Amino acid sequence: MIKIDNNIKSTLKFIDYVVDESFYTTNKNFKEEPVQLDIKIGKEISISEKNDELFVILKCEIFEDAVKKNYPFSLSVKITGIFGISEIPEENINNLVNINAVSILFPYVRALISTLTASFNVQPLILPPINVLKLFENDIEEPSK
């Protein structure tokens, strides 16, 4: 067993997450054929007025325009992650927010989508892991207050 030393623990504290919304629609006209995964992931980031909490909203849309593009369904989920940032130096916040916080939150989105699709009696959709740095490399943003 490895003992975790305090100097390697992250200063970003994951507090909780909330599922804000989920939306699912079956395409009753779906013609059985293989489909490519069509996924869009977006984020919004804000910091509390006291500068001690960070809110990261991840929205994931899968198979948008299912009827038009012959996808089996459309699904979108939106979750908000709550993080403590009171001990983080200001110069480190941007990277911790845009990379680490999203990386921590994304597995919850993946699990939610797998669970929802299994519950809707379609083949459970298991999203692949993503490289958050590459996904948002052109979209690194300063958190809004």
Image: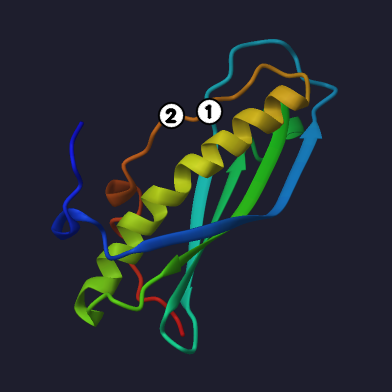
* Residue 139 showing in the rendered view: no
Q: Amino acid at mark 2?
A: Pro
Q: Residue at x 61, y 38 (%)?
A: 112
Residue 79 in picture, x, y percent from top left: 60, 55
Q: Is residue 17 left or right of residue 7?
A: right
Determine which of the numbered discs, if any, sits on residue 128 in the image: 2
**Amino acid identity at mark 1:** Leu
Work out whether 144 lies above or below 69. Answer: below
Answer with mark 1 or mark 2, whichever residue precedes in sequence: 1
Q: Indicate how the structure is coloured in the image.
A: rainbow
Instruction: Find out whether the residues at labels 1 and 2 contact each other: C-beta distance under 8 Å.
Output: yes
Q: Residues within 10 Å of mark 1 (few under 14, many from 20)?
A: few
Describe residue 62's horizontal placement relative to residue 47 as left or right: right
Q: How many numbered discs, if any?
A: 2
Q: Residues within 10 Å of mark 2 (few under 14, many from 20)?
A: few
Identify the residue at horizontal 25%, vertical 81% (top origin): 90
